[in-house]
Image (cartoon, rainbow, N blue to C red):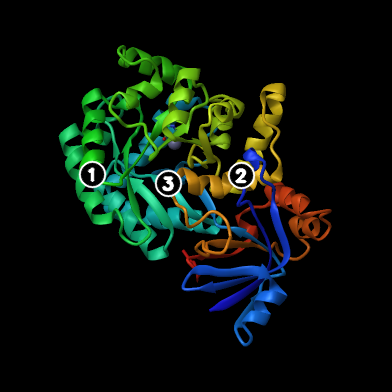
Amino acid sequence: MTIYRCRVLDTPDDPFAGGTLRADDDAGLLVQGGVIAERGAFADVAARHPGESVTDLRAGVLLPGLIDTHVHYPQVRAIGGLGMPLLDWLDQCALPEEQRLAEPEYARAVAREFLTGLTSAGTTTALVFGSHYPDAVDALFTEADRVGTRVTAGLVVSDHNLPEPLLSTPERSYREGRALAERWHGHGRLRYAVTPRFSYSTTSDMLASCADLLSDVPGLWFTSHVNENPAEIAAVADLFPGAANYTDTYAKHGLIHRRSVLAHNAHPRDEELHLLGEVGASIAHCPTSNSALASGSFPLRRHLDHGVRVALGTDVGAGSGFSLFKEGLQAYFMQQLLKEDGVPLTPAHLLHLATRAGATALGLDDVGDLSAGRRFDAILVQPSAAQPLDVCLRHAASAENALAKIFSIGTPADVARVWIDGDIVVA
Ligand code: GUN
Ligand code: ZN
């Protein structure tokens, strides 16, 4: 057992539903077997457990581990392809790189780089878009298992409209996906997500095979992309004349439910929001990606009005890096620029979107904040002395203001320590 003495910020109560930032200046978190067994004022917790070892973290700020609900493993080396809209960026940046993961040694190297990217940014849980190649997905799970990160991921499947080496068939995709799901779903902290790339690159038969896999292996997750870019949406409408809208291309096959997480949704129709809200599906909002590809401004207000769950994704490599602080800041900017159509986001909203909202989207009840009873997934933000964030934190007017400073100028370099299940994680 260890008592962590810390300045801690978290958002157990949803700020979109009236909750506020929980800030404790001198808390004690008693961690036993990876679980926060007790939380209270440090003096009280220490008095109840005399002689227990104490780790003093007050030189930094303790936050819950960050949760990335949309990030592409094979795109680490594709970060930074600026100046293109989605379909051109896929052709010129992402898809050439993704084909290189056909080579298992290359895939293993990228898997290591990817897990390092997550961990060093303070991401302890992620819903990961895998690779089109089963061996590469195996390499991802193997590395995530070694590092200890909570990863939900799967084989990416497509059967048209992509370069030929990335294509498969519904039968082969089912077979390969099933073998991976049987190997990894429920292994340690890992889970499997059925992952058609997007309706633009999948036929109805492929989506039907995805539905078969979801129903044949209990508890799998579903992830894909939706309503990202106007040209993409128009092409999907042409490819699926029988579907009422983009979401319906998936919903028709029974793919939209509580365990579905769709990235982007920058251009939804009301009836799509209605369905997503009704079934409890989630949207991974990826603001740096939406900005870099000029995909569009995320209509957060309309999502909230329809009761749609929203969390944050970095969307590496269209997104500009692994930092959920940067995504939070960009989400804030985007809503500001929407003026009266935007949602004014407070630091508490940003922290919630980067932590507890992600846990809720991913159906993980035991992480996302640092309440007693949750697993100890946490990060220590502790900038180097005299760096601007260090100066800012020492002069913060309040806990809210300190959090605003962390989201404004915090980077992976400021994440000094990362714990998952009480263990220090090193990638
Ligand atoms: N839609 C289909 N594939 C992708 C991808 O790799 N990145 C993004 N941003 N959108 C996609
Ligand atoms: Zn994506």
Relative to 150, 160 lies left or right = left
Residue position for label 3: 127
Q: Which of the two residues, 342 or 313, is positioned nearer the viewer here?
A: 342
User: Could you tell me residue 79's position as x and y percent?
Assistant: 50, 42
Q: How many marks?
A: 3
Q: Nearer the viewer, residue 70 or 274?
A: 274
Mark whose residue sits in front, 2 or 3 = 2
Q: Is mark 1 within 8 Å of ligand 1?
A: no
Mark 3–mark 1 Cα distance, whole angstroms, equals 16 Å
Residue at disc 2, secondary structure: loop
For marks 2 and 3 on the same chain, the one whose residue lies earlier in the sequence: 2
Residue 101 or 141: which is nearer the viewer?
141
| Quadrant hosting residue 238 | top left
In the image, residue 209 lies at what x, y percent? 21, 33
- Cβ of mark 2 under 8 Å from ligand 2: the answer is no
Which is nearer the N-term, disc 2 or disc 1?
2
- Local crowd at mark 2 within 10 Å, few (<14), some, or many (≥20)? some
Residue 182 vertical placement versus 52 (above, below): above
Where is mark 2, residue-wise? 14
Instruction: In the rendered view, tell whether residue 210 sits above or below residue 20.
Output: above
Tag 2: amino acid: Asp
**Badge 1 element:** helix
